[in-house]
Image: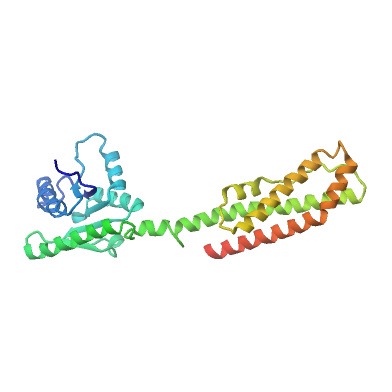
Amino acid sequence: MPRKPKYRCFVIMPFSTTSETHTEDYWSKHFETFLKVIVDPIPNIKAYRSEALRGDILKQIIRELITAEVVIADITDYNPNVFWELGVRQSFKHCTITIAEEGTVLPFDISSKSTLFYSPKDHIKNSKFTTKLKNAIKDCLKNPDKPDSYILETISGRGSLYEIIRGEENLRRLDALNSEINYNIEIFNSVYDIFDEGGGIPTQRFRTSAIKLFITNRYVNLSKAEFELLEEYYDDMRLLNGQLRVIELDETRTKKFLQSRKETDQRSLKIISESIKRIIKNISKGIS
């Protein structure tokens, strides 16, 4: 029993007539007697294309475009479906090979992408094309993460659009954290002003939502020591809130406890505030 090929080579190409010479019958033969004959002899891979009348064709094509190990896109005659499928493929995965009949003028969008040209008549030229296509397929199987999609390079990886958007989102979160820390510093000073003036019982509480999000999601890369410092700050704010909630039960003892922590907590707030400002500054540099 023949062994099932391990890899799939999905061919993007027209189904119907695209010119006087490129009829529906031409494209069927182009796949069966030309491209398939080149691909299938390569070990562990098989060429195929979607059947025009099979079920929900669009969903099927999208699945195949995303999951196939290799995709060959024939852009001859500028068929809109082919270009749409090529865009879908290159939005999700590398290992895409573009081919075209000799004489095809490449559109600007893909003119910088390496395209292999075949000849409708010249056997010698097609022998060279065959060798190049086989080598390109083998390279895809050997180096599946080798970049060949400008879309993926733009939206993923260092310095990419994705990283810039992520950096801006993190800046908004850090700005909220910075505001929360500044608010807590004000509340801290207010609480101890009340104590020093011998006034009543503080009613405001320290905020912890932004710092909780930070230490839970860890959306910025920091050292273990830096995260431990932020976790201590979070625990300190919760502890202070807890003491402020029970101050009515034992006002003298609670105030005495809070006064014993004043200098330590004050230093902690200052260190945390400077640390977050430094992180914001570093991220701002990276996305500017």
The reply, left or right, for residue 217 in relation to residue 183 is left
x%, y% of residue 257?
A: 85, 47
Q: Residue at x 10, y 65 (%)?
A: 125
- Count the marks: how many? 0
Q: Residue at x 83, y 48 (%)?
A: 258
Q: Is 278 located above or below residue 194 in the figure? A: below
x%, y% of residue 210?
A: 64, 48
Q: Residue at x 61, y 47 (%)?
A: 213
Q: Is 142 located above or below residue 200 in the figure? A: below
Which residue extends farthest top?
A: 55
> Which quadrant of the structure image shows residue 152?
bottom left
Q: How is the image coloured?
A: rainbow
Which residue extends farthest front?
A: 1
x%, y% of residue 238?
A: 73, 44
Nearest to the observer: residue 5 or residue 286: 5
Q: Is 148 located above or below residue 248 in the figure? A: below
Nearest to the observer: residue 149 or residue 108: 149
Which residue extends farthest right?
A: 198
- For the N terminus, the image quarter is top left
Q: Residue at x 31, y 50 (%)?
A: 89
User: Visible in this render: residue 213?
Assistant: yes
x%, y% of residue 157?
A: 43, 59
The reply, left or right, for residue 276 in relation to residue 15 is right
The reply, left or right, for residue 125 in relation to residue 207 is left
User: Visible in this render: residue 104?
Assistant: no
